[in-house]
Amino acid sequence: MTASTTHHIIPEIKTTARCAALLVPSEVLPESKRVDAMALDLGGIPGSRHHGFTRKAGPREPWYARGMEMRSGRALTIVSVEELPMIAAAMGVSAIEPEWIGANVVLEGIPRLSWLPSGTRLFFDDATILVEAQNAPCRISGKSVARHVDPDGKIAGLALEFPKMAAGLRGLVASVERAGTIRVGEEISVKVPRQSIWTA
């Protein structure tokens, strides 16, 4: 039997998207603030807390000792115009803004953005972003959402709802493969690599 008959293979896909918004970290963690353009180097957004090629292992990496230095792959977080309203609807709130959850890049036009595979490349005019993994929602972002939606704290458990309802919709973490400046409104070429689903 050939590989094509024993494994499920999805050919390479090329599509396009639009950069709907760009955001840089703000003074209030984990929030971010909107900008018209963003200069990227190979470590990400210069001056940001996620900038650099390494980071400390945390609860997302239980296979490593907490605090161990490891490759980052979290230079940028990417969310979707289409998916944020889905999270809001699941939580029963009117809206969730990308700046509340510390997003850096907001894309429009890619169905199921959060499920783009690792290795997908986003080609801006002057820079290239490489998708590393799906972003797991956390309580810190949940607390930020609750602070904005329910400043008086009248809705019990709202912060804890975000990690549950945002699973599979929270977007992506990515690194910078080609440094340069990216801009709001750009049309982006998206190259999804050939995928082969591995089974034992």
Image (cartoon, grey):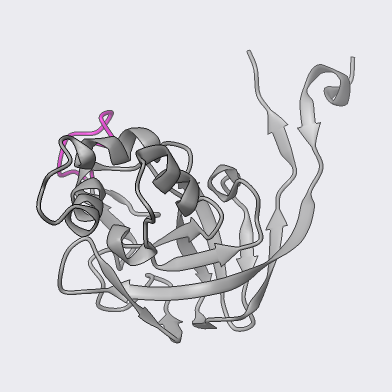
Q: Is residue 69 above or below residue 2?
A: below
The answer to which quarter of the image holds residue 58 is top left
Residue at 34%, 54% in the rendered image: 72
The furthest residue to the left: 152
Where's the C terminus, which quadrant? top right
In the drawing, does residue 107 fall left or right of residue 47?
right
- Per the rendered image, the range of residues in magenta is 57-68
In the drawing, does residue 123 fall left or right of residue 82?
right
How far across and how far down the image is residue 156, in percent? Answer: 15, 36
Where's the N terminus, which quadrant? top right
Magenta segment includes 56? no
Magenta segment includes 63? yes
Of residue 131 and residue 33, the one placed in the foreground of this image is: 33
Magenta: predominant secondary structure element?
Answer: loop
How far across and how far down the image is residue 123, in percent? Answer: 64, 71
Residue at 21%, 42% in the rendered image: 159
